[in-house]
Every structure is written in structure tokens, then in C-alpha cells.
Amino acid sequence: MPSIRTALLAAALPLLLHSGAHAQGTPPPHKRLDVIREGMTPAQVRAILGEPLRTRRDGALTYLYFANGCDRCTGDDFVVVRDCRVVGARFDNPNRYVVRSEPVDPTPPPAAECALAAAEPGRAAPIPLVSDSLRRAPVERPVDANAVPPPAGPALVAAAEAPEPALPQDDPRGWRARLSLRRPATHLVAVPAASISSPTAFGSQQGEAFVGGAYQARTRFTDLSDGAMVLGFGLGDRQRYVGLEVAATSYSTLRGGGPLETGGLSFKLHRAFGETWGVAVGYENAVDWGGSDAGHSPYAVATHVFRLKPDAAQPLSAVAATLGVGGGRFRTEDDVVADRKTANVFGAVGVQLFEPLAVTADWNGQDLFAGVSAAPIRRVPFVVTAGLADITGSAGDGARFVVSAALGFRYLPPFFF
Amino acid sequence: MRRATRSTLAAVAALALAVATASAQGGNQSDISGPVVTGSGAVGGSFLGAGLRSENEMFGRAGKEVVFRNARIGCAVRGAEAAYRDSAARQPQTPAQRRVFDLLAVNAGTPSADAVAAALAHGAAAGSPLGMAARRLADALNGLMRDRGGCAQARQEYTEAPQWREAIDAFQRYVADAPASAFSPPAPELLAIHAALQRVVEEALRRDAR
């Protein structure tokens, strides 16, 4: 026995000395435990195992090969990655382990985490093929605490064809909610005006309203500026039946008695035929108050839109032509001065240069207007139109700068009409 | 222009002329000698054929044809389809996903609208409401996401727009109208269809918004 004890001590002493020496320095690589968990990203794997010797793709799977680091091992160790997450591995090196973990976070990791090697740029995380509604559902998954050693070879990792997941139980209403599809939304769209002074044959219908203001740098035969405001709304259905537009105008603004001291109510019955034709009859200032000099102006008008390009986003996509006949302010200056009860022709042509910008020429029976109309914010129907009135001097005493701004909006949500 | 339209025009013109002579006005007309303030003309919209107009963020119409709203969104849809095809090729697929992806032409496999329609029908007869909704959806998906090459210049060249519109409508109609038995649980094919449509539409709109 003493000889046996002596022999054991002799054998143990070098081992103790050897281990003590290593405790003060860096342990050799084969003594380190490298634990790779399912769900790790390639970047996390590389932080533990270093850079892979090579990578190989096989369908949806990517194999990262590493030097096994042991003399008696055969073949390289490898880690299998799918969707930027470790799904398995095979290690000959006894100091390397793969551990199955809890259900993997379904959130795609950042692209930088998916780089398979230091030299490779980050790859975009793939688009999940499963509905969010299903991915949020609790998924039962067994947890293997490394009790069973992984079988050798690539067969241990997920197959290229995934099993059909068990769908969570839910009532039909819950499923209908989960499977709701985001429909492309509809928005109001802003389009410039096709006239300046003449009414067109298109108007507001049920659910649509507008508010605006207009300004003249000077009125006819004066050096006085003038402003007006309008608030209106629509009723009816212009495509199926007929639309009725009602507008309240305040011809007084800041001077005198202020807003609404003088004003009028105007009406327009309008009918649209498809998207290119419209006809309307209207009565401007059918009701007035406060002694405005606007007068009453009945009219009938038709507008046709010539589609030059099928895509409104393209330049020169449409021309809108308006032709009407009316009394009141649409009469010639001579007839107005002589108080002759006549009718006169008016019309306007607007050219849509770009989707948000148009130029317009407008003959309102007395004055020739020319100007530019813009809808600067695509999904906000705010339109600014500026130009010159009476550029031919046919009524009044020369050209005058005029500008208007108006905002359209809905007073009912879309599903009401 | 149709005969009825011409008749309507003539009638309203005659009416206006009849009332026009009753009008009277004095003064220098300072109140109405500027921009029109008696209606919605200042709000614009006439180039679209009406006052206020709504616009779908994905689809529009060119005449009677359904088209993408513009070429940009069409290009975004094709880009999103390509990204989805690429993702599908890199991931394992369940048998139901494979059937749907074959039908959508996300995979290169042989499409079978019959197989997908049968799964969506949940055993209902082909002539039943559910069977017909399933068939409509399956037909709308046939080849929907096939590789059509790069982007085109004009929105009319994106001939897949009507099929996309039909696919979305058919899916919504199926989910809304299918009986409760179709959701206990739903066919896995339905979830695969939902994911594919949802992902591509969202990605396309995201690309368009950039």
C-alpha cells in the first residue's frame, strides 16, 4: 500500500502544480467551456467561437464552420443558423456545448447582428412568413436543458420544411380580428383650381365643406383693396342624383361693420357624369343682406375635363374647360351700367401643368383673368390661386391683382357618403 | 357624351337663360369683381371631375380600369414582392405555406388553385357561399406575386394592379363572410395568405412613403 500511496502522491503533485500555475494565467483554449444557445445571432456566436473558417448555405440554413481546437477531433465544428438565429450545432470539441433555450424572441434582430463574418456587411433580416397575429400567440415549445446530447450531423437541425404549427384556439370573432388586412387607406387629395372668377360645373356634395377668402389689391375704378370670405357645404350625391352646394359669403371683412355686415347666400345644383363631365345651375346671392353691390347672378354651366395623360402625377395631365351662360355679374359692363336684363357667356380653361399646379385663363363675362393655382400639400385640400383681373381692360380701369385661398374638409366621415 | 347628358345640358341651359333676364345689378360690382367667393371653385378639384376627392393610397382608376395610384407605388409593390420572394426562399415553409407560395408564384413550384380553394372551403361544397368565396380568393392569388421584372415607367404598365385589388377584396370578403366553422381553427393556408398580402402591402406602402 505505501508504494501505491507514494505513487499516487507522485502522480498528483505535478497535476496540482500544473493547475496552480494555470490558475494565475489564461486557461488554455481546450479548458474553456464555450456555450452556444439556440436563438443566438451570428454576431454572438462569433464573439464566443471567433471568426468562422467558412460558411455554407443549404436552403434556408447557413452553416458556420469553426476549427475544432482539439487534436483528437475529426472534422470541423459547425453552428447552424436560420433567420439570423442559431437553430443547432455540432461540436466535436468536448468543451463546446449547444444548449436549447426558451422560445426564441420572434423579433428580427438588427441587420448588423446577422453578419456571418467580420468582413461581411450586415444582411437584412428576412421578412417573417407568419402572420403577426399568429406569432403573438403563445407557442408551446419543449425545453431541453442539454440533457440529451445532440445527434451528429446536420440532421439535428431544423428540416428545410417546417412542421405545421398548432393554431391557437380562439373564437371566430377573434380570428376575424387577427386576420384583418390593412386596406390601403383613402385620403382627401388636393388639386388646383381650374378657374378664378367663373363658377365651374363641379361642386360639393354630402359630407364636403369648404372655407376660404379672397382679396383684391384694388377694386374696379378705385384704389381700395377689398376682401371677402366664404363658408359652404354640400348635400346630396352628385354622381347618383344631384348635389346641392350652399355657400354663405361675407362681402365685408375688416372695414365698416366687420364680417357678415354684408353678404349673400348662393346655391348650386350640380350633377357629375363620370369623372369628366359636369353640369350645374346656380344662383349667386339668391339671398343677400347689408346692401352688397354683388347683385343676383343666375347661371348655367358645363365643365369637361380632357384627360391628356392617364396618370395625374405626370406633367400636363389634364385640361378643364368650362362654358356657361348667366345674368347678373356675368353680363357685359355696358349691360350692367345700362341695367339691361341680359345674359352673357362666360368660360374658363385650366391646364394642369403638374399635379399640384395649374394655370388658368378665365372670362367671367366682363374681365379676362389669368393666374396660377397651387395645391401645395398633397393630402390637404388647401388651394391658393393668384392672378390678374381685367388684363384686357375691357371692364374697369386696368389690371388688378387678385388672390384667393380656400380649404376643403369633410363634415361627415367617409362612410356616411 | 351620351344623349341623356346632352339633354340635361340643354335643359339646365334653358332654365338658366329663363331666369337670367330677371337679374338686375348696380354699382361697380366691387364685391364680386375678384376671385369667385360664391362657391367651392376656389377649393379646386375640378381637374378630378368634382369638388373634394378622396384618393386611395395604393389604387386608382384610369377610365374604368383599376390601376396603381401611380408608377411609384407600382414599383414599390414589385420591390416588396421581390423581397418577400427572397425571404420565402431563405426560410423553411410549412406544407400550407408551400401550397400558398406555389399559388402566389413566390415559389417556383406548380400552383394549384384547387388545393388552396379546397383548404379554404373547409369541406364546404364548391357551390356554397364559402366554397365560392374560397374559389374567388384562390383564383385571385394565382400568380399574383410572380416575378414581372423591374419597374415600369407608366402606371398602366403595371397590369397586376387589378389582380392585387381583387386579391385584397376577396380576402377581406372571405374573412368577413365565412361562417364560424371556417375559423375553428382557420385553414393554415388562410394565415399564409394573410401574412403574404399583409407583408407585401405594408412594405410597398412603406417604400412609397420614403
Image (spheres, helix red, strand yellow):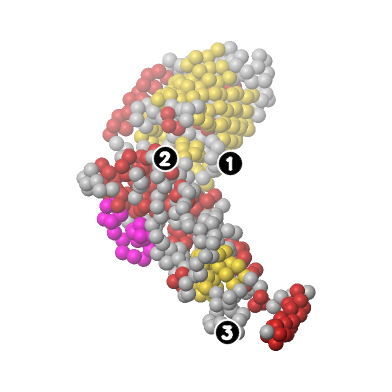
In primary-sequence order, the first of circles 2 and 1 is 2
Prevailing secondary structure of the magenta residues: helix
Alpha-carbon neighbours of circle 3 within 10 Å: few (<14), some, or many (≥20)?
few
Alpha-carbon neighbours of circle 1 within 10 Å: few (<14), some, or many (≥20)?
some
The residue type indicated by label 3 comes to Arg
State the SS at label 1.
loop
* Residue identified by numbered label 2: A174
Asked whether disc 2 touches disc 3, contact meaning CB atoms under 8 Å apart, the reply is: no
- Front: mark 1 or 3: 3
Magenta segment, which residues? B93-118
Alpha-carbon neighbours of circle 2 within 10 Å: few (<14), some, or many (≥20)?
few
Depth check, front residue: A387 or A416: A416
> In this view, which residue lies farthest toward the front?
A1
- Front: mark 2 or 1: 2
- Front: mark 2 or 3: 3
Whether discs 2 and 3 lie on one chain: the answer is yes
Q: Chain of mark 2?
A: A
State the SS at label 3.
loop
In primary-sequence order, the first of circles 2 and 3 is 3
Q: Which mark, residue A376?
A: 1
**Which quadrant would the N terminus of chain B be assigned to in this image?**
top left
Would you place residue B96 above or below residue B134 in this image?
A: below
The residue type indicated by label 2 comes to Gly
State the SS at label 2.
helix
Whether residue B40 is visible:
no
Whether residue A161 is visible:
yes
Would you place residue A383 above or below residue A123 in this image?
A: above
Q: Which mark, residue A72?
A: 3
Depth check, front residue: B98 or B112: B98
